[in-house]
């Protein structure tokens, strides 16, 4: 990732796409409150989460939309796989988040960029609540769903406010997922 995120002015409008790194679809609100990080298309052939995020972003851009009480950053996952319309190119991005250390690949490079972006966002919100949504589907035709990395009360309460299907317990069987990584990082 060669660009950095600039601070956002308090606003419900997204920054100009030219001012954001390629991976960042939107950076809304103000860094003065909680941070909500939303990921879409961790797998490059699963566009339903992106469509859901686009719908929410369009609603937030409408006149009279509610102001955010904090900051929301929406990022895309595996950019080369998205461009190719493939789940992944070399390794499944949603199986190689730290502590996994896979061999060098373009998918690992994508992971490393996301990890660096997460570190930067987290440093910009040192004392704020950190929230995370992975808008995910399967590689077959399906609706977006929330993958819940934990059954802790805060996670369940947060997820109950989202009108999406929810999957819990996945990280007990599959390691290296972004949702578990972010949960372990304090989101």
Image (cartoon, rainbow, N blue to C red):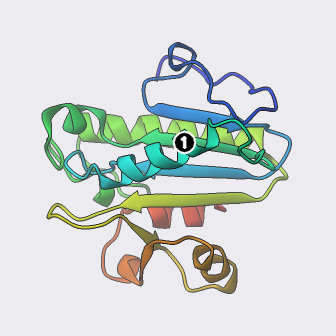
Q: Position of residue 132 (x, y in %)?
A: 58, 59
Depth check: 61 or 137 in front? Answer: 61
Q: Is residue 121 above or below residue 37?
A: above
Q: Is residue 121 visible?
A: yes
Question: Residue 26 appears in which quarter of the rendering?
Answer: top right
Quarter of the image with the C terminus is: bottom right
Q: Is residue 6 left or right of residue 138?
A: right
Residue drawn 35% across and 61% down? 136
Q: Is residue 105 visible?
A: no
SS state under label 1: helix
Residue drawn 33% across and 48% down? 41
Q: Position of residue 175 (x, y in %)?
A: 34, 70
Circle 1 Cα neighbour tier, 10 Å, few/some/many (<14 / 14–19 / ≥20): some
Residue drawn 23% across and 37% down? 82
Q: Position of residue 32 (x, y in %)?
A: 86, 41
Q: Which residue is mark 1?
A: 57
């Amino acid at each position: 990732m060669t660009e950095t995120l600039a601070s956002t002015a308090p606003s419900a409008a997204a920054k100009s796409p030219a001012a954001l790194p390629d991976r960042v679809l939107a950076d809304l609100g103000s860094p003065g409150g909680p941070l909500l990080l939303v990921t879409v298309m961790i797998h490059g052939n699963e566009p339903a989460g992106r469509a859901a995020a686009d719908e929410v972003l369009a609603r937030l851009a409408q006149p009279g939309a509610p102001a955010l009480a904090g900051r929301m950053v929406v990022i895309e996952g595996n950019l080369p796989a998205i461009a190719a319309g493939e789940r992944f190119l070399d390794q499944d991005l949603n199986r190689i988040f730290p502590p996994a250390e896979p061999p060098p690949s373009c998918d690992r490079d994508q992971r490393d960029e996301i990890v660096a972006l997460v570190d930067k966002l987290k440093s910009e919100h040192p004392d704020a609540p950190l929230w995370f949504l992975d808008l995910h589907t399967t590689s077959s035709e399906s609706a977006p769903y929330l993958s819940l990395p934990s059954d802790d009360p805060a996670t369940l309460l947060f997820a109950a406010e989202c009108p999406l299907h929810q999957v819990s317990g996945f990280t007990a069987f599959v390691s290296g997922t972004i949702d578990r990584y972010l949960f372990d990082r304090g989101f």
